[in-house]
Amino acid sequence: MNTQKNTAHSPSALMALTAAAMMLPNAAQADPPDQQYQVQFSQARYQEAPIPQHKLGLGSDQRYLIDVSHLRFKAPTSSDTELNLSLLHESMSGASPWFVMPDAEGELVQVMSEATISEERTELGVDFRSYNQRSEVTLSAGHSTENDYSSYSIGFSGAWRLNQDHTSLNFGANSSRDYIDATDAERFNRPTGERLNRSGLSAGVTQVINPINLASINVGLNLVEGFLSDPYKLALVGQETVADSRPDTHEQINIDLSWRRFIKGANAALHLDYRYFTSDWEIDAHTLELSWYQNLGNGWQLTPTLRYHSQSAATFYRPYYTQTRNDGYYSSDYRLSAFDAYSGQLKLIKRFDTLQLDIGYEHYQAEGDHPGLLSYDLLTLGIGYRFQ
Amino acid sequence: MSQGRLHSLRFKAMGSRCELQLYGSEHLARTVGEVALAYVRRLERKYSRYRGDSVTSTINLAAGLHPVTVDHETARLLDYADALYQQSSGLFDVTSGILRRAWDFTSNKLPSEVELTHLTPLIGWHRVGWDGHQIFLPDPGMELDFGGYVKEYCADQVADLCRQHGITHGLVNLGGDIHLIGPHPDGSPWLVGIQNPRSPGKPIAKVTMTEGAIATSGDYERYMVVDGIRYSHLLNPFTGRSLQPTFASASVIAARCLIAGSFSTLALLKSPLEPQWLTDQGLPYLLVDPALRLSGTLQTHGTYATPAIGQPS
């Protein structure tokens, strides 16, 4: 034990005492369960724009319309634990892209499914969060079901707070198993009884740089294996269509950087996020998102967000194939094509004492060679209530 | 958050009158008030000298017997005590609280030389074993007391908690140790009263503040007058005798109340030998001398007749 304590007189008492004071724990910095109940409900309408006539080969030009209802409930279970429940219901209608072919002029056109699809999906999620002064842990479980697809997932995530809560080490692991039973399997020779396993690991660091700047880096690894093809999509090979067929593993890496800066003079905060994604299907993607959280006083907050996404195509992707492939992989899914996408979003929140109302609108537009690339509008209305 | 009305919550804690002034809805103010009060009570219990189960008692009961491993918060508070000791050349010593046994300010009787000679050997942070995790008071009877700065630390923490819960306008006042959460909702400053050292409860001056913290140390907090001489609670840990500070009070403004309080206390402890010390520290301050003359870098707003600590302007 060191008992040496010189009474050396430092030239700057302010510096020495401030340094010692900085090391003290901050009661407010961490985010302990707040011992309040919260109920939140949001209703969203997601509407994909119709396929332009000059890009439509056959079928309906109407794409998905999805109505999403989402109910969330948070309850304290003890002074340092809380339970979060989430129930989501989607009802979906519209036609979906089927395959791509060149038209008489050699331009790519999208062939859509003919019949209007009508589907329901329900998802239940449970999170249990346990907190103590230096760390926290969340255990999650989820189940999602629709008539042709069901999924079970579990997750674990945690954080260690170090350096007087200025540094946080975050880590997580998750796993899910999905079961796929395509509809009209016999009629269209679609797969049934297929499985898909997903496992992921993530780790990262969040650093409070000073009271107005916060930065974080997060790295995630995901391994997906099983039936990764889309049972409802086809690809044109020569004059024939074949079922969408993809490798049965997909290894993915993502690196996320984020920076938060509070701008005191404007009573606003700037959020800048960047994600790099790469996978062994050779999809490389960059996503940049910029948000400005503007407090307007009286409980109003307006947040405009701009997002840009750019990705390269999967190695086996072609809009259509002129010859067969040795590896047997075929996919003309627009999500595997190279494209750039832009999105603009505006969200307005009004907070009352215990009540919060929000409204958000987003427009998204993708650009690339694939005729089926999306454009959508999303309108969200939310209401939240908290009580003791 | 809606800004709402001003809510005031008064309570007694750490031997002082305390007050939270929070702008917000009634519900929010009540919720935050409960969280803040629970926090203050927790800290009060944790570092109480009177409770057998407090951290302070645990350390003191092990004096001369064995080292005690302390929690993270206590460890950093002890590191802070170490910094205070070094910056004050030993005048601010967390082991000097034991002099309380000899000094009874209600008795109007000075301690005897014999009493002091018995107590001073038990004082000395430099003899305490402290390695960042374990603390060991080497002699039976030695005592540690966090009272000299835990209230200021608490004011900072409570202000942070209020901010975390969405309060952006208000102040925390723990017995005159004041941490501003933020100005009035219209951006106007708070008028903070500086107590008149010779007229309890009356301000000698007011200062305007929109942010930061202010703390005042004075010779009036506990004192007695014997044979016409004023003996204050500011004691010299080396001799055990009451210091005769050059100033009746010192007020300091800093970003954190802990810093402000440390400097106001150090200013008085050092004043007999280094009356100019505070002038050189770079923090805004106000000194009141025994003749009630004001000096310092703080802009004041004259003398007021009514108590004004934390009053809205």
Image (cartoon, coloured by chain):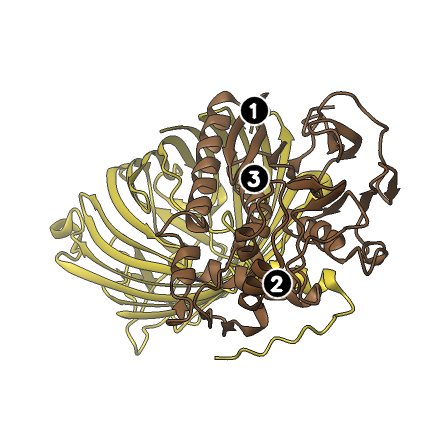
Chain colours: A yellow, B brown
Locate residue A260 relative to residue A82 in the image: left or right: right
Q: Is residue A16 left or right of residue A182?
A: right
Could you say whether the residue bearing mark 2 is in a helix, strand or loop? helix
Residue found at x 76% / y 32%: B196
Q: Which residue is mark 3?
A: B163
Who's the residue at 24% across and 56% down the image?
A154
> Residue B8: which disc?
1
Q: Position of residue A14 (x, y in %)?
A: 73, 60
Badge 1: chain ID: B
Q: Chain of mark 2?
A: A
Query: How far from the left and from the top, in percent, is residue B117?
Result: 59, 64
- Pointer 1: residues within 10 angstroms few (<14), some, or many (20+)? some
- Quadrant of the image containing the C terminus of chain A: top left
The front one of A1 and A182 is: A1
First-in-chain label (3 vs 1)? 1
Label 2, label 3: how far apart the Cα atoms are: 23 Å
Q: Which residue is drawn at the image coordinates 37% and 71% (left, top)?
A: B65
Direction from residue A109 to residue A289 in the image, left or right: right
- At label 3, the amino acid type is Arg
Real-space Cα separation, disc 3 to disc 1, in angstroms: 16 Å
**Closer to the eye: label 3 or 1:** 1
Quadrant of the rendered image containing residue B127: bottom right
Mark 2 sits on what residue? A20
**Element marked by disc 3:** helix
3 and 1 marks on the same chain? yes
